[in-house]
Image (cartoon, rainbow, N blue to C red):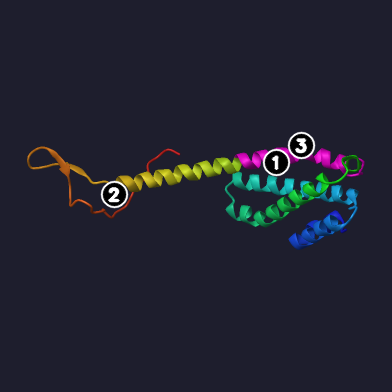
Amino acid sequence: MPAPTDVITAGQDGLAAAIRAAAGRQDPEVATLVADLAHVVEELTRILEEETAALAVKDMDRMRALQGDKQRLGRGYEQLYALLGRQDQAAVRATPDFERLGAAAPRFAEAVKENLRRIGAARSLNERILGAVRNAIVRAQAPTTVYGANGRTCTAGRAGTIRAGAISVNTSI
């Protein structure tokens, strides 16, 4: 099985090949799987922290650039975690990199939590902006009520027509 850094730098194909090789063995080398998972957790943490920082300053180009690595590492994490779950847990805990994995876990959990919080805030903001635009369009298309010749209110223009024109969104976000 390749070294942890080989798995990450080889891209998705290399990671998938390493995972298939480990899964196909009768007795996969648990220490290598733990080392690979620790490396993936460290790299994924770094990527999540970079994406969170990019979200904070609205650097969309940087966020897009990180997506491939984030997806590849996320799949690798899920697959390696599943493989380790099928191993003898005493053997997993006895590996040299188990402490490294445990030490990386709190920072990883915090990175995931903060990343999800930032993504949720961005999604909420986008929904509010889209809602304000939708409401402005509805208001712009609503018939105008005016006073008629008899002094009563009535709808201006022909019924069923949609007025073209600019909309204004004056909503505090």
Q: Are marks 2 and 3 in contact (CB under 8 Å)?
A: no
Q: Earlier in the sequence, mark 1 or mark 3?
A: 3
Amino acid, disc 3: Pro
Q: Earlier in the sequence, mark 2 or mark 3?
A: 3
Q: Nearer the viewer, residue 90 or 60?
A: 90
Q: Nearer the viewer, residue 108 or 22?
A: 22
Residue at position x 75%, y 49% in the image? 77
User: Label 2, label 1: how many angstroms apart (C-alpha)?
Assistant: 45 Å
Whole-percent x and y of residue 15? 78, 58
Which quarter of the rendering shows the N terminus?
bottom right
Residue that carries the numbered disc 1 in the rendered image: 111
Residue that carries the numbered disc 3 in the rendered image: 106
Q: For the residue carrying disc 1, how many other residues have a C-alpha within 10 Å: few (<14), some (14-19), or many (20+)?
A: many
Q: For the residue carrying disc 3, how many other residues have a C-alpha within 10 Å: few (<14), some (14-19), or many (20+)?
A: few
Q: Are marks 1 and 3 in contact (CB under 8 Å)?
A: no
Whole-percent x and y of residue 97? 88, 44
- Secondary structure of residue under mark 3: helix
Where are the magenta residues, as a range?
A: 94-117
Residue extending farthest to the left is: 150
Whole-percent x and y of residue 72? 71, 55
Which quarter of the rendering shows the C terminus?
top left
Whole-percent x and y of residue 145? 20, 42
Amino acid, disc 1: Ala
- Secondary structure of residue under mark 2: helix
Direction from residue 78 to residue 146 in the image, left or right: left
Residue that carries the numbered disc 2 in the rendered image: 141
Residue at position x 34%, y 48% in the image? 137
